[in-house]
Image (spheres, rainbow, N blue to C red):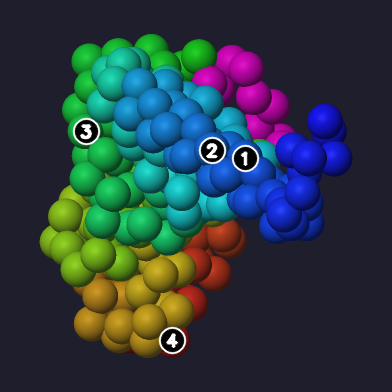
């Protein structure tokens, strides 16, 4: 009876057809699940793409996660991941939103308390405020808004100069771009803050003097 049923059937083709159908079903299911997670659970996609080293996709999903929750922690993550992926338009846009958030000061203070700043935050030295202001300013510059970059950098400047200030982020980008004009603008703003014996007197602060010498050379 079994032999009759199998007579005339190519078992190889049958197995191959069954395998192809199964594979197609798996692919369709995977795409459906991918779409569901992308739309409704972007945090899962952030973790997945991060683990796979897909920085661009991870930055995209981090923005989607912030849009879903509105949480400042997700917003800060979106800014830093967008910057890391060189998505400068997104980093500039959401960095400006982050710095205007009512909870920004408290959030930065919390990050400072949790991080040993003899070490690093996001791979870069500095306080949380200077880190986020710095990558926002640099992203604004790299995305073509030099005026906003200058204001962001100097708006966050403290009472004295530090080599991890936001100004150094945007200055580094300008020097890399051989932008003599913008380097001159930064130098002019720093000179305007300087007075004999104050915290921006380059003759009293070697780090500031070296920084301004670098700008003078670039300008």
Residue 25's label in the rendered image is 2
Secondary-structure class at tag 4: helix
Number of numbered tags placed on the structure image: 4
How many residues crowd mark 2 within 10 Å: few (<14), some (14–19), many (20+)?
few
Between marks 4 and 2 in the image, the one whose residue lies nearer the viewer: 2
160 or 140, which is in the foreground?
A: 140
Q: Which residues are magenta?
A: 111-119
Q: Position of residue 70 (x, y in %)?
A: 27, 18
- Mark 1 and mark 2 in contact? Answer it, CB < 8 Å: yes
User: On residue 52, which mark appears?
Assistant: none
What separation in Å lies between label 4 and label 3 (alpha carbons)? Answer: 34 Å
Question: Which quadrant holds residue 69?
Answer: top left
Q: Position of residue 21 (x, y in %)?
A: 58, 44
Tag in front: 1 or 4 = 1
Q: Residue at x 46, y 49 (%)?
A: 57
Kindly report the distance in space between the C-alpha atoms of the residues bearing marks 1 and 2. Answer: 5 Å
Q: Residue at x 65, y 32 (%)?
A: 117
> Which residue carries the number 3 mark?
97
Q: Provide the residue designation for mark 1.
A: 22
Q: Specify whether residue 122 is painted magenta.
A: no
What residue is shown at x 33% (from left), y 48% (from top)? 91
| Residue on which disc 4 sits | 217
Within-10-Å neighbours for mark 3: few <14, some 14–19, many 20+? some
């Amino acid at each position: 009876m079994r032999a009759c049923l199998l007579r005339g059937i190519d078992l190889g083709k049958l197995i191959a057809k069954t395998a192809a159908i199964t594979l197609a079903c798996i692919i369709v299911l995977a795409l459906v699940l991918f779409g569901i997670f992308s739309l409704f659970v972007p945090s899962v996609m952030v973790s997945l793409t991060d683990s796979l080293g897909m920085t661009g996709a991870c930055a995209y999903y981090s923005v989607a996660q912030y849009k879903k929750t509105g949480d400042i922690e997700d917003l800060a993550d979106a800014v830093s991941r967008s910057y890391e992926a060189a998505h400068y338009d997104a980093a500039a846009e959401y960095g400006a939103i982050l710095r205007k958030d009512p909870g920004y000061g408290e959030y930065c203070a919390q990050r400072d308390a949790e991080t040993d700043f003899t070490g690093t935050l996001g791979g870069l030295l500095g306080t949380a405020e200077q880190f986020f202001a710095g990558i926002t300013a640099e992203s604004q510059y790299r995305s073509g808004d030099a005026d906003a970059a200058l204001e962001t950098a100097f708006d966050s400047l403290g009472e004295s100069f530090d080599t991890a200030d936001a100004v150094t982020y945007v200055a580094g980008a300008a020097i890399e771009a051989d932008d003599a004009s913008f380097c001159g603008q930064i130098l002019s703003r720093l000179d305007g803050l300087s007075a004999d014996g104050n915290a921006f007197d380059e003759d009293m602060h070697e780090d500031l003097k070296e920084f301004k010498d670098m700008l003078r050379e670039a300008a």
